Amino acid sequence: MSEASGTPARQEQERSRVTRQRLMEAAIGALSELGWAGATMTVIAERAGVSRGACQHHFPTRADLVAAAVEYVGHQQVEAVLRKAARLPADARRTEAILHMLAGIYLSPVFTAAVQLWVAAVADPELRAQLAPLEARVGREFHRLTVRLLGVDDGVAEVRELIQGTLDLIRGLALANLLRDDSARRKKVLHRWALTLDEALGARRARKA
Amino acid sequence: MSEASGTPARQEQERSRVTRQRLMEAAIGALSELGWAGATMTVIAERAGVSRGACQHHFPTRADLVAAAVEYVGHQQVEAVLRKAARLPADARRTEAILHMLAGIYLSPVFTAAVQLWVAAVADPELRAQLAPLEARVGREFHRLTVRLLGVDDGVAEVRELIQGTLDLIRGLALANLLRDDSARRKKVLHRWALTLDEALGARRARKA
């Protein structure tokens, strides 16, 4: 960004932003590959090329860092999907294309990192308390994204429940992909789900009209 | 079981069966509560009230024990659902009741234990190799159970894909329940999916007829 060449305060701010970003990206990588036990502050700082002290200056605890990382990287992915949304087909294949885009988020390391955190939180009430509001926020952002892409009115309970179910399905598919490449099966399931969802949303629209 | 009062060989066999069962149940409890890192052989043997040596006699490695445990406890739950199936309503509420029964399996500690294993396997190729065929077997058993309860013909691709999607949805719902009690939302999502699934399966049947 051109601001980096501004005043010393601006430069300092920009350096700080870049360091935070590198730490968050390193946290997602370490968590998704090594799990909660393996992704220590030392490992994450090393991967980011940042000193342990600088790391702790930005994120006092590991829970602070990973929570910020899941939210930041999750948000980045939502933004990336929105940028690609203009290229979505407008015809009958649209819903299926949207489901594949959403599945793409859940198939990325940020989902693996999030699942690593969720399961670590099962045995750690403090971590759980920190993650619960984060999960709710990220969940709402994915829900809004889906509503926007599908162009539906989620003020209607039936529609809202179908959207939620769709995101639960995609999360389940992502879990199935942790151990092996499940893409062939996933493609068929998403194709069928897209047709079923279109029929259900269409029926809903028809009843409304 | 009455066989326990039989010949010494029979008694020995029965004792061995009981010990294995206790170890497998302790493994599920330890894994679901403490995760892969915390559920050591020592912890599991202690919880089962079995010596470390006896534990290793039955299960040479921890991976052997947990893989056997997930399969055994998963199978027990399928059997329990089949026993309760006779009491399922035969009317329009049947599909929803089936979805709740299936969700019950995924909401139990065996699912939490399985997710703990899956995420540990991400960083452990040896564990992954051992778990992949197990996951496939357990997945097939749940699929067959669902087909049987719903009374559908999964030789038809559309039906098979809808059943798979239903199980992926339920897995996703179970994941959402790891951090908090998600039952109110889950109830609505399953209600809506039951209606949608019935319509989709009904349309399929109508086209076939």
Image (cartoon, coloured by chain):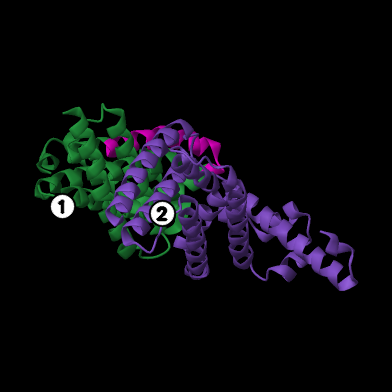
Chain colours: A purple, B green
Q: Position of residue A139 (x, y in %)?
A: 48, 60
Spatial CA span between label 2 and label 1:
25 Å
State which quarter of the image contains the C terminus of chain A.
Answer: bottom left
Residue at image point 65% right, 56% down: A27
Residue B191 in which image quadrant = bottom left
Residue A160 in which image quadrant = bottom left
Residue at image point 14% right, 46% down: B85
Left/right of residue B8 with respect to residue A27 in the rendered view: left
Residue at image point 53% right, 44% down: A101
Disc 2 target residue: B175
Lower position in the chain sequence, tag 2 or tag 1: 1
Res. A178 in view = no
Disc 1 target residue: B93
Res. B55 in view = yes
Predominant SS of the magenta segment: helix
Label 1 element class:
loop
Q: Given the image, what chain letter belongs to the residue carrying mark 2?
A: B
Residue found at the very far front of the displayed protein: A209
Above/below status of A161 relative to B197 = below
Above/below status of B33 relative to B121 = below
Q: Position of residue B55 (x, y in %)?
A: 38, 45
Please report the bounds of the magenta region as a residue range. B122-143
